[in-house]
């Protein structure tokens, strides 16, 4: 991901990524608790597993993520 991110935006991009990742753990636990309470625990775990598999398959078939390359139109810097 660092190769795809313009150098002048890396701090901002990785700062947001870190903040979302840190906030995701407690929010995911709360959401998972509500889903498990509303349905049942095995169904909530199965649903979570299906979402994880879907995200993984999507990332696997994404050409940008697989190749680690981008075109000039996908990522433009403001440097001159």
Image (tube, rainbow, N blue to C red):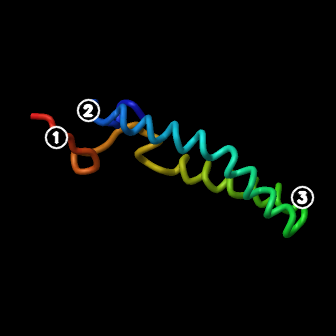
- What element does badge 3 sit on? helix
Mark seen at residue 41: 3
Q: Kindly indicate whether the residue at mark 2 contacts the one at mark 1 (C-beta within 8 angstroms).
A: yes
Q: Residues within 10 Å of mark 3 (few under 14, many from 20)?
A: some
Residue furthest to the bottom in view is 38
- What element does badge 1 sit on? loop
Taking the spot 69% from the left edge, 46% from the top edge, the residue there is 26
Residue that mark 2 sits on: 8
In whole angstroms, how far apart are the C-alphas of marks 1 and 2?
8 Å
Query: Which quarter of the picture shows residue 23?
Result: top right
Q: Nearer the viewer, residue 46 or 30?
A: 30
Residue that mark 1 sits on: 78
Q: Left or right: 56 with respect to 7? A: right
Query: In terms of sequence position, does the residue under pointer 1 or pointer 2 come before the other?
Result: 2
Compared to residue 33, the image places residue 80 above or below, namely: above
**Residue 55 spot, x, y in % from top left:** 61, 52
Q: Residues within 10 Å of mark 2 (few under 14, many from 20)?
A: few
Q: Left or right: 21 with respect to 11? A: right
Q: Quadrant of the C terminus?
A: top left
Q: Nearer the viewer, residue 74 or 23?
A: 23
**Residue 27 spot, x, y in % from top left:** 67, 51
Compared to residue 6, the image places residue 51 above or below, namely: below
Mark seen at residue 63: none
Query: Which quarter of the picture shows residue 10?
Result: top left
Q: Left or right: 28 with respect to 40? A: left
Compared to residue 71, the image places residue 6 above or below, namely: above
Query: In terms of sequence position, does the residue under pointer 1 or pointer 3 come before the other?
Result: 3
Taking the spot 48% from the left edge, 40% from the top edge, the residue there is 17
In whole angstroms, how far apart are the C-alphas of marks 1 and 3?
49 Å
């Amino acid at each position: 991901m660092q190769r795809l991110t313009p150098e002048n935006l890396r701090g901002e991009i990785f700062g947001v990524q870190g903040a979302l990742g840190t906030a995701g753990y407690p929010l995911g636990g709360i959401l998972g608790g509500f889903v498990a309470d509303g349905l049942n625990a095995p169904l909530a775990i199965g649903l979570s597993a299906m979402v994880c598999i879907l995200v993984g398959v999507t990332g696997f078939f994404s050409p940008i993520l697989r190749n680690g390359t981008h075109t000039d139109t996908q990522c433009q810097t403001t440097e001159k």
